[in-house]
Image (cartoon, helix red, strand yellow):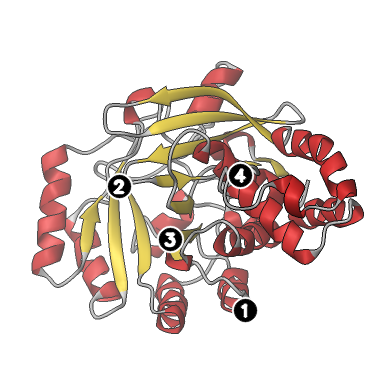
Amino acid sequence: MHIHAIREQLRALGAKPEHEQRILRDWLQVRSRSSGRRKAEDYLPLSLREGLGEFDAGLRNLVRLVSSHATPDGSARLLVGLADGQTVESVLLPRDGLCVSSQVGCAVGCQFCMTGRDGLLRQLTSGEIVGQVALARSIRTVKKVVFMGMGEPSHNLQNVMEAIDLLGTEGNLGHKNLVFSTVGDPRVFEQLPLGTVKPALALSLHTTRQDLRERLLPRAPRIAIEDLVELAEEYARKTMYPVQYQWTLLDGINDGEEELDGIVRLLKGRHAIMNIIPYNAVDGLPFSRPPDEHAREMIRILHRRGILAKLRDSAAQEVDGGCGQLRARALGPAAPRPIAIHRA
């Protein structure tokens, strides 16, 4: 169900704008309608009160918790069931964060990611996207939502933007605490500045070498890396939020001196943060996680050379934490696709 359909249901039940706003806030912020100074029976029209039971059941049917896998670092990977039997993953992050999915599967086919193994199966509706937030908030506090789970948000742009708008207005989330992640679809840079809620931007870069990026992200838009960084910088200037560049660190592939030089060349003087994320190993794929000390040394080198960089450990590493791995484990074994990546 889409958010606009949810709103239409409320209006059909007799909700006025202020009633609609209160009910959506109660849903997204997991608040009881009997809390606060005004109980539901004190302010909602009779027709709306009578229809709320069925309406609430429809919201609960959008998403459900299939399983939860916690780790000592404070993360928890959630396998989330949808009404049609499909599943996606959300991740509760340390410091009150949540990573949500925007698609079942993914069409980009990143070579190191399990999500795109079977391609794109379907889009999530805007209701299913925000439903992941309501579900997570029924478990614990969520103050930041990142669109970095299963799927490429730009390929489901209308639904993701509809979800971001609701989360940033009725969901009690600061706009900079909503983070839109993309491999660099041009539509993102056209549409995000037009929204009422302007999220922070995360750009999945992974390498400064054009040829390598096209092999690692075979179906990402073929845009020169320098042009992508310039588009991202333009958005950063408009919103005053730094761009968060994402870099999945692959041992012997994108962790050498050439890449460090490239990062400095691209990002020095930019309104940017480089997030280095050591790889979550996937059985059958020809990638591995570099030694922890090597990753830390890369951060130290970048700092010395004037780049704001952070080492972001992959959440839920202990429970097959890479995007799509928990879902794949639940579905059963399947042969990984063949890959040919030449090491640097």
Q: Residue furthest top?
A: 332
Q: Residues within 10 Å of mark 3 (few under 14, many from 20)?
A: some
Instruction: Name which residue type carries label 1.
Output: Leu
Q: Which mark is residue 329?
A: none
- What is the x, y in percent for residue 299? 16, 56
- What is the x, y in percent for residue 177? 43, 60
Read off the residue under disc 3.
Answer: 177
Read off the residue under disc 4.
Answer: 106
Instruction: Name which residue type carries label 3.
Output: Asn
Read off the residue under disc 2.
Answer: 277
Q: What residue is shown at x 70% (from left), y 62% (from top)?
A: 158
Residue 336 visible from this viewpoint: no
Residue 185 visible from this viewpoint: yes
Question: Are the residues flagged by discs 2 and 1 in contact, CB closer than 8 Å?
Answer: no
Instruction: Name which residue type carries label 4.
Output: Cys
**Pointer 3 or 4: first along the chain:** 4
Read off the residue under disc 1.
Answer: 194
Element class at badge 2:
strand
Element class at badge 3:
helix
